[in-house]
Amino acid sequence: MLLKNTFVHHVHFWLKNKEDKQRLIDGLNTLMPITHIRDIHIGVPADTNRDVIDRSYDVSLLLLFDDKASQDAYQVDPTHVIFAEEYAKPLCAKVVVQDCVNI
């Protein structure tokens, strides 16, 4: 199925301490009630091993929004701000975000 009218926000997290993985996942789960999010996927690297696959991250977050305005509203939503301050910033050594839209 071709996704239309979709703003994709994909975030990869590298933990400072691998033992904090479940704590970060618990934090990501707090984002689920945010109404601006259309779909959410929280994952860890799959057991796939090809040269083009980067499995160096610890946890990923894939969010689908209806449009950029919804994604912008998500960024300032208090629940997201709390997640960033209480989970992502203290637990992560690196965070990479990739946003994309339909062509």
Image: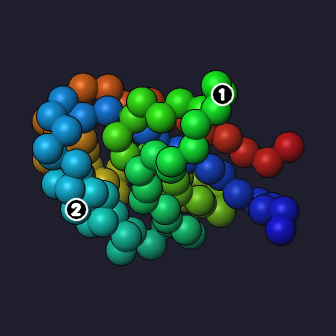
Q: Could you tell me which secondary element the residue under label 1 belongs to?
A: loop
Residue at 49% across, 64% down: 40
Q: Could you tell me which secondary element the residue under label 2 belongs to?
A: helix
Q: Give left or right: position of 40 versus 82.
A: right
Q: Position of residue 29 (x, y in %)?
A: 30, 66
Q: Nearer the viewer, residue 35 or 31?
A: 31
Residue at 65% across, 52% down: 7
Q: Nearer the viewer, residue 47 or 53?
A: 47
Q: Can you identify the residue that label 1 sits on?
A: 52
Q: Can you identify the residue that label 2 sits on?
A: 26
Q: Can residue 72 be seen?
A: no
Q: CA distance from mark 2 to mark 1?
A: 29 Å
Position of the N terminus by quadrant? bottom right
The amino acid type, in three-letter code, at marker 1 is Val
- Report the number of numbered marks: 2
Q: Give left or right: position of 98 versus 59.
A: right
Residue 23 lies in quadrant: bottom left
Q: Are marks 2 and 1 in contact (CB under 8 Å)?
A: no
Q: Give left or right: position of 74 versus 1.
A: left
Crowding at dot 2, Cα within 10 Å, few <14 / some 14-19 / many 20+, comes out as few
Dot 2 or dot 1, earlier in sequence: 2
Q: Position of residue 69 (x, y in %)?
A: 58, 53
The relative height of residue 5 versus residue 87 in the rendered view (above or below) is below
Q: Which mark is residue 15?
A: none
Residue at 36% across, 31% down: 95
Residue at 27% across, 57% down: 25
Residue 101 lies in quadrant: top right
Q: Position of residue 33 (x, y in %)?
A: 36, 74
Structure colour scheme: rainbow
Q: Give left or right: position of 102 versus 12.
A: right
Crowding at dot 1, Cα within 10 Å, few <14 / some 14-19 / many 20+, comes out as few
The amino acid type, in three-letter code, at marker 2 is Asp
